[in-house]
Amino acid sequence: MSSYFAESEWGRVRAQAKLQWDRISYAELEQVRGNPDYLAELVQERYQLDEDDAREWVQEFFDSI
């Protein structure tokens, strides 16, 4: 996956991401800075998903924004 959001846009998207994934802290989401690969790693870890499922969930989120 490649970055879909510039850092300047990530602040707006971060709040929506927090609603989607409440097990990930705002501080962690701030570090994501629009990087879907890093977000997928966090989603995989927090929600105990396999890599493909986490990536798919993140991709669906990015596509919906």
Image: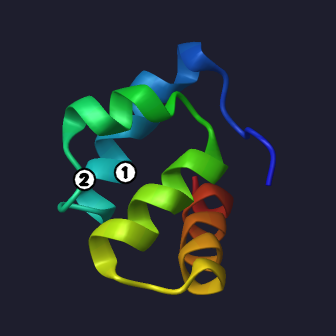
The amino acid pointed to by label 2 is Ile
In this figure, which residue is indicated by the disc labeled 1?
17
Q: Which residue reaches farthest right?
A: 2
SS assignment at label 2: loop
Tell me if mark 2 has few (under 14), some (14-19) or many (20+) residues whose alpha carbon lies within 10 angstroms of its own.
some
Q: Position of residue 49 (x, y in %)?
A: 44, 85
Rendering quarter of residue 44? bottom left
Q: How is the image coloured?
A: rainbow
Rendering quarter of residue 14? top left
Q: Residue at x 52, y 27 (%)?
A: 33
SS assignment at label 1: helix
Q: Is tag 1's residue or tag 2's residue first in the polypeptide sequence?
A: 1
Q: Residue at x 56, y 65 (%)?
A: 58
Q: Position of residue 15 (x, y in %)?
A: 30, 40
Q: Is residue 28 left or right of residue 11?
A: left
Q: Quadrant of the N terminus?
A: bottom right
Q: Residue at x 54, y 75 (%)?
A: 54
Residue 51: numbered disc: none
In this figure, which residue is indicated by the disc labeled 2?
24
Cα distance, mark 1 to mark 2?
A: 9 Å
Q: Are dots 1 and 2 in contact, CB under 8 Å? A: yes
